[in-house]
Amino acid sequence: MGSNSRRDFIKKGSALGLIAAATGAAGIAANQSEKPTGEKMKVLTTDGKVIEVDKPSSNCEIEPCAPPKGEEARKGIPGRSFVMVIDLAKCKNARKCIEGCQKGHDLLPDQEYMKVHLMKDNPEAEPYWFPKNCFHCDNPPCVKVCPVGATFKRTDNIVLVDADACIGCKFCVSACPYSARIFNWTDKESYASNDPNYSPETGTPGQHGTVSKCDFCPDRSREGKLPYCAMSCPMGAIYFGDKNEDAVYNGEETLRFTQLIKDRIGYRYLEELGTKPNVYYLPATDRMFPYERGFSSLSEEQKEVMEKSIESK
Amino acid sequence: MKTINQYRPVGRYFSLFLITFCTLFGVIAPLDGQSQTRTRLKVYYEKLPNSDKKISIILTEGKGKKTKGVGNALISISTVALDSTIELATITTDTIGEAFLFVEANYSFPKNEDGYSELNLNYSGNDSLKSAKKSIEFLDLNLDLFFDIVDSVKYLEVSAFEFDSTGAQMPIEEVGIKMGVKRLYSTLYLEEVDSDKDGVASMEFPNDIPGDSVGMITVIARVEDHDDYGTVTKTKTIDWGTAVDYSMESNGRSLFGDSAPLWMIISVAVILIGAWFHFLLAVYKVYKMSRLAKD
Amino acid sequence: MDSNSISNKLLDENMSFIAKPSIKWILKVVVLALIVCVGLYALFLQVTKGHLITGMRDNVVWGVYIVNFVFVLGLSYAGALIAGIFHLGRVKWATPLQRILKLITVFSLIIGPFYILLCLGRPERLFDLFLHPRIQSPIIWDVVAIVTDLVFCIVYLYFTYIKDFALLRDNSDKLNMPNWRKKFYKFVAIGYDDTPKQKKLLNQSLDILAAIIIPTTIIAYSLLAWLFGMNLKVGWHSSIFAPFFILSAVYSGVALLILIMWIYRRTRKLEHIFTDNHFKYLGFALMGLSLFYGYFYFSEYITNWYNMQKTSGLLWEKYLDFSEYGFYFYGSIFLVTLLPAIVIGIPWFRSVGSIAFTSVAVLVGLWILRYLMIVPVLETPYVPIQDIRPDWVHYSATWIEWSLTIAGVALFVLFFILVAKIAPIIPIAEMEEDQEEAKKIVSPKEEV
């Protein structure tokens, strides 16, 4: 069992505990107000008896916990300003962020909301691994060009796509200078049109012929959980948090966002395009691994393609 | 479990190790040809902010990278009072091998001869899994938070103490106490301070921690994975944060908002009205022309 | 309307449209319809199986479809623009060309938008464009502009037909028309009797329409250019795009006009209507436009090349590399900027046939240049493509896209063939008016 899963396990426990805390002195047994999930949890009462109570449906950090639909999904979580910080010095291309995201969002194996590129800034510099998802820009070129308002910018910084409204014109895909958007080229069994449970916040089920992309997992934030990618990174390279709270968390440590960006000279990719991204990068200085180690998770073919693309010309 | 003979190629040191291992744990492999996998129990004790306790249990099988949780396994939990054993509960692990037992705040665990509370966990195993045991000892630590302002400098003070048998507070020194504030995903720890001889750890509280719209923040003091006390957390809410304007900012009239900039609407309207007006005028003229037909 | 000698002569010469369809004509229609049907089958496959059967992928999200869209709409806007300018400028020698120009406009305006619909992943949600439009999106600008232009141009085309319909109505007995044709012409002529008052009203209406169609087409094609210009993409994000697009539109429109004139001249023996002079004038226009085009192309590209940014450099490498787009790049530049100057500029080469041939070369070259303007740019994003799937890196159109492209051409020809059955392809009444004014037929027999 890796340190990663142990961390999750402990945290899961704490999450349940905080619910118990919320119910106060009346005792956990009295906590029946939450919608039950059908699952039970065991409680040892004051007089030494063991009783079973319903487990609360989820740990709700932000009300409402259920991902909203329709007009409500376009508004954003009040008071939040989500931001991501990716520490390039820690990334070794383990590709766990991609896998976690694909599993969480029910993506096909070749659909990647998060991509990891091999980058080289100039002919002399060492290459480094560059995880890249949607930057949820404050001046989003993709949202500007959408003809039907199917993609929208929310007050909590998040740019989402409503697959029920998308006409699949792909203009946003070409408008995004960061190649963050993907089109659902093939039909998939789990894809559904007008699924009553569909929320743009979860993005699932996807829909054939529409555009989708990284959604910053607001449905998980409502439960106080990190996005899939941040949670899955074994190196803790991906920090996520609320800029209004001035804190970012990678599953292991919580840092002050302003301090981190100030100290490590955080930057935003292609800042000069004026898109004002909400994903920050910490430069790949003092890296923890030689970049070649990242090739171990790639096929020989993929390795060749990457090395060729960074060749200085 | 394979017979020792099968391990011969590996070398006899390994065989020796296996024999020692098996003897030490009093486990004798059934030699009926069926193999049993080793299992392992882990347990964590935690005291929650409202003084409820939580026992987190995980049962795993296998070693190294092949480790996985054992689901739907019965684990019995007992405690020791002086020399007698009290069965507390039997709990079933979930699909990934985890189980949680919550203990209400007012339940007091009995103490053993050493003055510790003791929990013994036992998994009896089955045909393919070996049994596993685990026991932990812990003491009941209390934390309390105090807020103090001296010369407009804010101090957060945390006192750590135990209750003795008479109910009096006994300060606990040299316990590392982490102090921080609650954030959406986690706790932002500001400092870790050891308690002094009065059981008090104190820190200067920064003035620039964002709170809610009126500056309220939840301050957290925590002792983590302590050998004697396990994990203990205490929280309190105070208006020591900076007030953040959380009012909803809508995108207003913008290229990426729901409503377009006014100049854009006006230009489009002017162009369209101009063009369609002339078009309708042209159509009207042809209409008038057709009314002039001879018949 | 009096049946004077000029209109009689013109009518007599152009009466083939009224004859019963010949076997050859039916054969042509059937073959064209079959080609269109193959395209419809490809469309059916694309709708049922999804866009994966086309060559489009996440980087090149639009391929040949958008090239066709831009190209065909360019022809349309050029037709309207040239017709409008000729009309308002009272360019008499151009009167016989007017109907062809307007037909080009309307047919390509009907066919062009189909290609953008083919890019939609969810064509059934098309009407959301009208139900929830976002005025900030260039696509909505285009939708509004195309719809407006389509209505204007169809109505304009019809209004220019009215005088001819009236002429045909008045000559119906003489021409031994079947009854349905008589009724049809009577209906569509909407009571035009060529009285001075009626003539004045109709001419005023045509002037107004010509006057608004000119700015409408300029705006509409600029908006189309901005569909690309508004992208933060190296190769597209350029302020020269709108005028460049309009210039290439006019260029391709003139080329197509020459080609259609040449086809009619050859097949219908219309040498006295589409005269050598027409070819000469339009040939010179073509040459002038080619030089202008070269100027625009050069100024756009030298600016990018002189101080080359990183991504711009990658794009340039693809253009110049013969293993990528080099052949197409140099080839189409030659066809579009140099060939017209050589063939038309040097008198020894100049002939009706060579001018028509150059037009075809220009049309092909312009189509390829549009392709080069779109596909390599999409293949060169800021973030390097590190995909191992070759079709994700390099766009190559599949038979689906090609068959729909050919179907578009076939539909265009089919429209021409069918519409030519309703009325002559030259505006007889207007030519008659011109001739009455000039009292002689504008048909100088100069050497070309």
Image: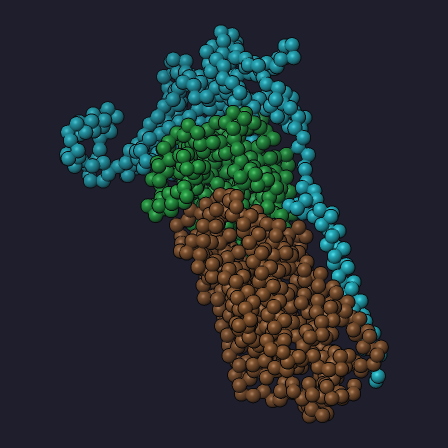
Chain colours: A green, B cyan, C brown
Identify the residue at horizontal 52%, vertical 83% (top origin).
C27
Whether residue C244 is situated above or below residue C284 in the rendered picture? above
On the image, the x and y values in percent for residue A131 come to 46, 39
Q: A35 or A125: which is nearer to us?
A: A125
Figure quadrant of the C terminus of chain C: bottom right
Q: A31 or B46: which is nearer to us?
A: B46
On the image, the x and y values in percent for residue C165 come to 72, 81
On the image, the x and y values in percent for residue A284 come to 44, 32
Identify the residue at horizontal 53%, vertical 81% (top origin).
C28
Residue B240 location, quadrant: top right
Identify the residue at horizontal 46%, vertical 21% (top origin).
B224
Relative placement, left or right, of A139 versus B69 is right
Figure quadrant of the N terminus of chain C: bottom right
Q: C333 or A281: which is nearer to us?
A: C333
Whether residue A297 is situated above or below residue C152 in the rendered picture? above
Q: Is residue B156 something one can see in this rendering?
A: yes
In this view, which residue lies farthest toward the top?
B197
Q: Is residue A65 something one can see in this rendering?
A: no
Q: C338 or A291: which is nearer to us?
A: C338
Relative placement, left or right, of A227 versus B272 is left
Whether residue C346 is situated above or below residue A211 in the rendered picture? below
Identify the residue at horizontal 58%, vertical 49% (top origin).
C237
Relative placement, left or right, of C13 versus B53 is right
Whether residue A145 is situated above or below residue B107 in the rendered picture? below
On the image, the x and y values in percent for residue A276 come to 59, 38
Residue C209 location, quadrant: bottom right
